Image: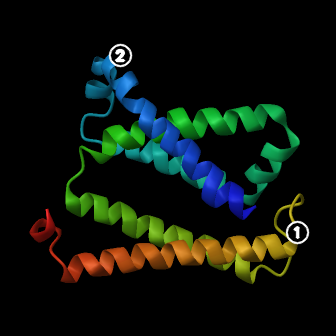
Amino acid sequence: MTLIQHMQMPLIVFSGFLMAPFFMKKFPVLFSKWNEGGWPGMLLFLIVLLYWMLPRTMDQALESMSMEIFKFISLAFLGGVPLRDSWRKFSKAKKNGILLFLMAVFAGMGLLYLLSPVQLCNNYLRIEQITLGWGFMITAACICVYLLQLLFINPDEYE
């Protein structure tokens, strides 16, 4: 469960992130009109990300081959490609706001998986659920440390 949420899914998004320049060159009008300020692409990325964090969708991906294929397509093409186009259009303040939102979501999901008295996913053991919860909490803590260090250290001094 932890390997799927914290390794497989981010790598699928990263593969879409790496494929984005090809699509951005192939369809420049689509990206310039559709994702002008970066918010539509970021919203699409966040919706896809939040959808695949739900316990029920993880169960469906294991039970149905069509959902597994949809996972790969949605995370790569509806997640990674818009993320790359949107991320470069955002200012530092907007990027930090997105990271702050993700930190809150990861902490919330971590608490959900840790404090739930019942097994949330039918295909995973309760101990895997607790491990995933700790993974979300550690990810949220790492984002928090990153955002805190931005307050005290000016990255422009090191570039």
The label on residue 153 is: none
Residue name at image x 24 percent, y 75 percent: 150
Residue name at image x 51 percent, y 36 percent: 78
Residue 108 in view in this figure: no
Could you tell me residue 54's position as x and y percent?
Answer: 69, 57
Could you tell me residue 58's position as x and y percent?
Answer: 75, 52
Residue annotated with mark 1: 125
Quadrant assignment for the C terminus: bottom left
- Contact between labelled residues 2 and 1, with CB atoms less than 8 Å apart: no
- The quadrant in which residue 146 appears is bottom left
The kind of residue on which mark 2 rests is Lys
- Left or right: 77, with 67 as reference point: left
Residue annotated with mark 2: 26
Q: How is the image coloured?
A: rainbow
- Left or right: 52, with 144 as reference point: right
SS at badge 2: helix
Q: Is residue 9 above or below residue 74?
A: below
Label 1 crowding class (10 Å Cα cut-off): few <14, some 14-19, many 20+? Answer: few
Residue pushed farthest top?
Answer: 26
Could you tell me residue 127's position as x and y percent?
Answer: 83, 76
The first of marks 1 and 2 along the sequence is 2
Quadrant assignment for the N terminus: bottom right
Residue 68 in view in this figure: yes
Residue name at image x 64 percent, y 79 percent: 111
Query: What is the CA distance from the residue labelled 1 to the residue labelled 2?
Result: 44 Å
